[in-house]
Amino acid sequence: MIKKVYSKSKLVAKTGNEVIAEALRQIEPDVIAAYPITPATEIVQIFSQFVADGVVKSEYIAVESEHSAISATIAASAAGARAMTSTSSQGLSLMWEMLYIAAGLRLPVIMAEVNRAISAPININADHSDTMGTRDAGWIQIYSENSQEAYDNIIQVTRIAEKAKLPAMVTMDGFITSHCMEVVEVYPDADVKTFVGEYKPERYLLDIKKPYTLGAIDLQDYYFEHRYQLAQAVRDAKDIILDIAGEFERTFGRKYGFYEKYMLDDAEVAIVIIGSTAGNVKAVVKELREKGIKAGLLKIRVYRPFPSEQIAKELAHVKVIAVMDRSDSCSGAFPPIYSDLTASLYSAGVVGPKILSYVYGIGGREFSSEQIVDVYEKLGKVASGAEKPFKGVEYINIRIK
Amino acid sequence: MSVKMIEVRWHGRGGQGAKTAALLFAEAVMATGKYIQAFPEYGPERMGAPVQSFNRISEEPIIIHSGIKNPDYVVVLDSSLMESVPVTEGLGKGGKIVINTSLSTSKIAQKLDIDISQVHVVNASQIALETIGRDIPNTPMLGALVKVIGTLDINGVLEDIETKLTAKFRHKPGVMKGNLTSIKRAFDEVKN
């Protein structure tokens, strides 16, 4: 039988998109402004139906582009509303300048993002290039392995963003999660509403008793301080994220943190990964453990803020680490997670582990269980000294060498 | 996993409801207390073009999110696909294929070059025409698949589908009845 974590919840079979729409219905934000894009379309399509049917009292603004979608969301948030949007890939790209503005204005805009490759060439399948491209915009970024996590994350992030006064996005993998129906535990409306509470902004533009200016020109006299404060707010969000995760666990029973460890504590070789592929890696780790191989996994959930010190501590004992990026940085150096992770370990004085950089799954390319086993085999050979670690970046399942 | 997971691949043509069938099937199987996944082939869909969808069924939580390469069961909604699509690809010796066709199991086994014990046939198009009034073979094929898998509870599946269809066709009770009858008939009529 299917096990429930929270006794009052209901088990449903839903896709990732459906379950995000369900969470948005329960949260019932004041405003949602959105423009549809594959594979995120259903989220706002279903939500707009809720609005049309009078199921929610939210204001739904159908706009003419993603730039307008995020602009309207930012404006609604500035006016004092709990405001949300949803997008993917090219849509997120078109929002780019406004993403920085949402963060710079310190507005808790919430986004449900479905990870998809970036053009050109045109591709609608999953990789993380879209959100990784916005990783330094000052947004909190939380990645989901499956629909349950996407649902739980969007509920938590509503609180996190408002407490941190930062915009935040929750992501899930395009098609793999967004279009996969699976069993999800959905909590009662009242309990979700109680958990997210009412949004009470400290200051907002429609508060005529406390008028203030938002988004004024800010040159060499103050700009630097304000950008510093933004960077600091992202750092400070770490405590908030853990506090809310704790409250979430006490309420609904599911435990969340910056990352999830799977058989990591005594691991000699480990994979670090983000998103839906983590489940496939867990299945491989389980098999390898049965053969006596000390394999482990660290799945990053919170990528922004990057839990630098904590990850360095968790990985210090591992002999060889593979960092799996589902986006490439085209930097001439290394992809994003690898860069963040190696800098974190080095800065913490953790220089023991050898760290290999892999790029996989670009544009939806298959990364099979056999290939995951191959990665662990390589790590094992490097750990035993039988093989040397490769330099640079290794691309998995690519036909060009 | 201690209990073996069941993996299913559906073949159809864009618009025939291969995706809907996988989703409906998963929901119904979940109602009988099992963990499920249902997902379409990733990519743009075109009316009439060959499409695939997939199911996983397990007694334990399903943690993998990868494509299905070696299905235990293959369901073919449109027998003309046998000419152009390798429908038996990845199907092992113990695997079974369920085909919507008026042909016999021996003819199909010959055509697909597999053992006759692996082949199950049902004339789902005929059943759909007689019960629903249109050639929509996806719902009857659900019943056929439940029978061929053998370990699923047909009554639980029917109950759940009845609830879903009652909500969906609340203005057309006849459609709901026709769909349910088609599932039952395919369950009874599918043969090896």
Image (cartoon, helix red, strand yellow):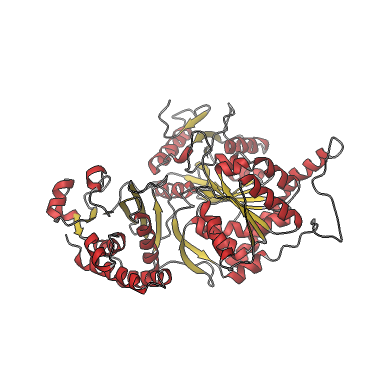
In screen coordinates, is B77 left or right of A167?
left
Q: Quadrant of the N terminus of chain B?
A: bottom left
Residue A378 vs residue B148: left or right? right
Q: Quadrant of the C terminus of chain B?
A: bottom left
* Quarter of the image where one finds residue B170: bottom left
Residue A345, relative to residue A166: is it above or below? above
Q: Position of residue A193 (x, y in %)?
A: 64, 68
Residue positioned 50% across, 35% down in the render: A359
* Residue B5 picture location, percent across and down: 34, 57
Q: Nearer the viewer, residue A165 or A386?
A: A165
Location of residue A150 (image quadrant): bottom right
Position of A169 with respect to A376 (left or right) is: right
Return the residue nearer the eye: A339 or A117: A117
Residue A359 at least partly seen: yes
The location of residue A32, given as percent across then percent down, is: 63, 57
Q: Is residue B59 visible?
A: no
